[in-house]
């Protein structure tokens, strides 16, 4: 879909921003460019739509050199989302979203109908369409930015650190929203971030750039975590890369322990920890030894959903006040308990098997 062939770029003073980049971006996948500041990731992204011109080499889209197309026309075939949202402050949300279709000659009424459809796609209320950007939260503005990028139904979506200006909770929500949209729309997405955790969450493949514009490693997230190619990648990914890598390993085969459960209103006597559940068998909290009713209930800890990763299984056990994680099925019903030692044994078995 997108190919960089021996692409280099220097800025004033001879600073090498991108060094002999060879890279193929898969159609319909999320490719993340990640690395420290000044490593060339944003420059590489902007060479796809000719916001930056390479000094040497070629950038191909569907086999065509992008330099052979007028820059303005090329950009209207690609969605672009930037860090600040880049919304026009004097236009309503609907008119912001309709910008590219209008530039492409789509009648105003038709472009606005498309914009209204996209409000639902990106999870915004229809009533927000009449507001102006200053009347929206940061997370809402970024959703509008994504909707505007999708308005002309482009095959390629370029995203330059789009979530870095919002708080961590909203950022996590936007990441999951992007993954939902990708499952629905299957765009070719090129996403720039400096956050390795964000790269691991979003990327089908991750391109790790090093200082000097060098592409250090290009691989699926699990491979980068498991086998960084050099000291730079290992240091950038972090010392806890082994724990992160568990997020890509299935917990199938994990043996659960039976849970001692108590429903509200039932006798709660017992020497050990008991799990308080509602009438549908969903966990409500833990009753510590000696607690006789829900007034002594302790909450906290994450849940492990059957079929998810070893990382989530270990998270549930380590974060639980009882020392045992709570495993639930797809309906949220308690399926058993997770012991951290059992998770570690399964990890060891996978490494030695």
Image: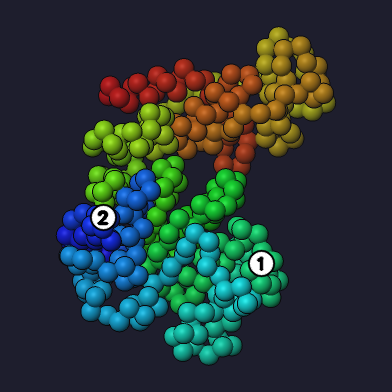
Is residue 313 in sight in this rendering? yes
Q: Which residue is mark 2?
A: 15
Q: How many marks?
A: 2
Horizontal side, residue 312 vs residue 296: left or right:
left
**Residue 54 on image: x %, y %:** 24, 66
- Horizontal placement of 18 versus 250: left or right? left
**Labels 2, 1: front one:** 2
Q: Earlier in the sequence, mark 2 or mark 1?
A: 2
The answer to which of 346 and 233 lies nearer the viewer is 233
- Residue 14, image x, y percentages: 23, 57
**Mark 2 nearby-residue class (10 Å; few <14, some 14–19, many ≥20):** few
Q: Where, quadrant-wise, is the N terminus in this rendering?
A: bottom left
| Disc 1 element | helix
Residue 252 seen from this side:
no
In the rendered image, the vertical position of residue 188 relative to residue 196, given as above or below: below
Residue at 79% across, 20% down: 296
Question: Which residue matches tag 1?
Answer: 134
């Amino acid at each position: 879909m997108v190919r960089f062939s021996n692409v280099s770029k220097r800025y004033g003073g001879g600073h090498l921003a991108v060094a002999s980049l060879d890279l193929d971006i898969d159609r319909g996948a999320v490719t993340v460019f990640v690395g420290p500041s000044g490593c060339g990731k944003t420059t590489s992204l902007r060479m796809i739509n000719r916001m930056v011109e390479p000094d040497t080499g070629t950038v191909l889209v569907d086999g065509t050199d992008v330099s052979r197309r007028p820059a303005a026309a090329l950009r209207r075939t690609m969605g672009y989302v930037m860090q600040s949202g880049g919304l026009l402050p004097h236009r309503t949300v609907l008119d912001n979203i309709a910008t590219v279709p209008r530039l492409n000659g789509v009648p105003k009424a038709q472009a606005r109908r498309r914009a209204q459809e996209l409000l639902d796609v990106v999870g915004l209320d229809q009533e927000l369409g009449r507001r102006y950007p200053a009347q929206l939260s940061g997370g809402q503005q970024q959703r509008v930015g994504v909707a505007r990028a999708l308005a002309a139904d482009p095959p390629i979506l370029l995203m330059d650190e789009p979530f870095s200006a919002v708080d961590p909770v909203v950022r996590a929500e936007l990441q999951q929203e992007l993954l939902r949209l990708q499952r629905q729309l299957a765009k070719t997405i090129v996403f720039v971030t400096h956050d390795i955790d964000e790269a691991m969450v979003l990327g089908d493949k991750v391109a790790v750039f090093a200082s000097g514009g060098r592409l250090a490693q290009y691989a699926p997230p699990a491979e980068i975590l498991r086998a960084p190619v050099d000291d730079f990648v290992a240091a950038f990914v972090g010392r806890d890369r082994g724990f992160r890598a568990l997020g890509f390993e299935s917990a199938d085969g994990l043996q659960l322990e039976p849970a001692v459960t108590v429903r509200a209103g039932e006798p709660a006597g017992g020497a050990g920890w008991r799990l308080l559940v509602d009438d549908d068998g969903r966990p409500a909290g833990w009753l510590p030894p000696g607690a006789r009713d829900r007034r002594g209930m302790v909450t906290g800890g994450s849940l492990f959903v059957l079929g998810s990763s070893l990382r989530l299984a270990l998270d549930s056990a380590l974060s639980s006040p009882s020392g045992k994680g709570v495993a639930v099925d797809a309906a949220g019903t308690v399926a058993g308990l997770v012991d951290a030692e059992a998770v570690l044994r399964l990890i060891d078995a996978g490494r030695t098997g």
